Amino acid sequence: MSPTATPSAQQGTTRDALPAVTASTRKLSGVTADAAVVGMVQGPDGATVAVEDLPEDSVHALEAAAAALDFTGKASTTLRLPGVEGLEVDQVVLVGLGRPDGDDVTPDTLRRAAGAALRAVSRASTVLVVLPTEEAEHARAVTEGALLGAYRFTAYKSGLASGATTASRDKDAKGKDAKGADGRDGVTELLVHVGARRDKDVRAAVERGQVVAAAVALARDLVNTPPLDLHPATFADRAEQAVRSLPVKVQVLDEKQLARKGYGGILAVGQGSSRPPRLVTLSYSPSRAKGHVALVGKGITFDTGGISLKPPASMPGMKADMSGAAAVLSTVVAAARLGLPVAVTGYLALAENMPGGAAQRPSDVITMYGGRTVEVLNTDAEGRLVMADAIVTALEQSPDAVIDVATLTGAQVVALGSRVSGVMANDDALRSEVVANADVAGEEMWPMPLPAHLRATMDSTVADIANISSKRDAGMLTAGVFLQEFVPTGGEQHVPWAHVDIAGPAFNEGGPFDHVHKGGTGAAVATLVRLLENRSV
């Protein structure tokens, strides 16, 4: 730690706990809550209630209010109303589900709507969620969306300590829970209405939704933590804490061990910082595992660009440059909590890229783990260096597939925007598998190529390869081609490998939308968990 840097009092703390969830089978007229969320679909004669279990007088009152206030039921739009006859609640939040696809609303529509509705709830501790949950996938999506919509990160808010909930805050004069320092109340309990069916699959889906939402929230917590408090060593500590009660083994290599083993990429990136790098390996190895997947995450806890310094305006968001490592850690946690019968090994390549007196210089040549040499022409192209070291390490375990996740290039944002991740691979089937699971998980990912001709743009006269291209175009693809150089491709040594660039989607710099808040998003976690679930069937 820098001698001039004093950790804040919140070091090691996290956001408020996610709300508790109950799959409620009680009649809606008999449920008491502070607020209710009710889904509405668009129709030719206006918005109509999407669930049949509501009391008839409640349905009439809600549909009349929607018509009077021009609420159309457009997807993810909300309207907050006072309580209505037939429901024991103080407020009702109507949320639009759009026009059903055929006779049904899609799970992703429900996930997004539930998130938008929970963000719209005000001054409520217990919330009844009344959305279509007849099918297991619908129940899971509603649970995920509602929990993530209720997500809060208040560890650094004055007067609102981390972990505080509405139950522990002072009451106002009317006995209601007082507002938090961020101007919103914290929801502590969700009652997800699943009807009177007592369907085991639906109940199991609600439980899985809780695990996935908690994993996404863990990734968000890490990304939202200021870099003063989250550097390579403390990130490693947080990883150990996260899996302490789970069947996951942890290995942490410090800077001395990294040097002895020849991790030239991770060491070079981290050598300019007074807070040295780490490589964390998380091993979840259930008995009778149906395959083995390796996950590699970029964990640059802060990226100044090094000597190739970034412009000042680009720096604040660089605390999110460890989002890939956060996603990998969270996915391993979820796999272990779900007890998936598939082995998962996660690698967190952790370093802080600073322009200190010992920092690497443009034109340095470094020897990577495994022996390849790289000419560093731009110290701000550092992510691919730590990732290459970790990918080579992952390959030593002979996994069935390697998937890396990284906020790797600004070019990804230029190409695909702030909500769509790019997926590159040396294996068409694996690339399609990642994209297909993203579609189911409600994340936007797009398949991208790895053009062979781009490799020549990284030729070096003094090393095996340069860390940047001699051309300015195709930056996202060039980074992928660089990483591919460290993966056996084709022939008997072929290992299926996919690279997911989440540079834009990992951190929401704009306003909140659906179940996504401003700040860390937890990008790629839901997709990776789905992929592992499907591989374990």
Image (tube, rainbow, N blue to C red):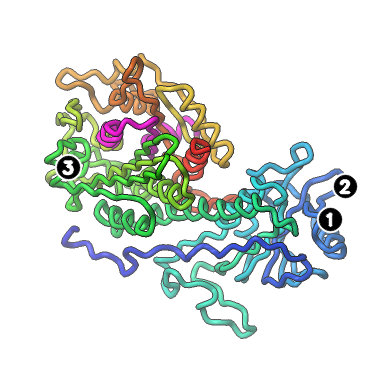
Q: Secondary structure at mark 3?
A: helix
- Residue at (55%, 32%) from the top-left corner? 436
Q: Secondary structure at mark 1?
A: helix
Query: Residue 501 at x, y = what percent?
Result: 42, 35
Q: Position of residue 318 (x, y in %)?
A: 35, 47
- Residue occupying the point 68% across, 68% down: 35
Q: What is the spatial separation of the Cα atoms under label 2 and label 1, in whole angstroms?
A: 9 Å
Q: Residue 479 location, x and y as percent? A: 34, 28
Depth check: give the residue in front, 347 or 74.
Answer: 347
Q: Which residues are magenta?
A: 387-416
**First in sequence: mark 2 or mark 3?**
2
* Residue 412 falls within the magenta-colored stretch: yes
Q: Which mark is residue 258?
A: 3
Q: Nearer the viewer, residue 509 or 331?
A: 331
Q: Residue at x 54, y 76 (%)?
A: 167
| C-beta proximity under 8 Å, tags 2 and 3 | no
Of callouts 1 and 3, the N-terminal one: 1
Q: Amino acid at mark 1?
A: Ala
* Crowd tier of the residue under label 1, counting other residues whose Cα lies within 10 Å: few below 14, some 14–19, many 20 or above: some
Proximity of marks 2 and 1: CB atoms separated by less than 8 Å: no
* Residue annotated with mark 1: 67
Q: Residue furthest bottom?
A: 173
Look at label 2 and name its amino acid.
Asp
Left or right of 184, for residue 47: right
Residue reaching furthest to the front: 288
Q: Answer with mark 2 or mark 1, whichever residue precedes in sequence.
A: 2
Quote the CA–CA distance across marks 2 and 3.
Answer: 67 Å
Provide the secondary structure element on which disc 2 rests.
Answer: loop
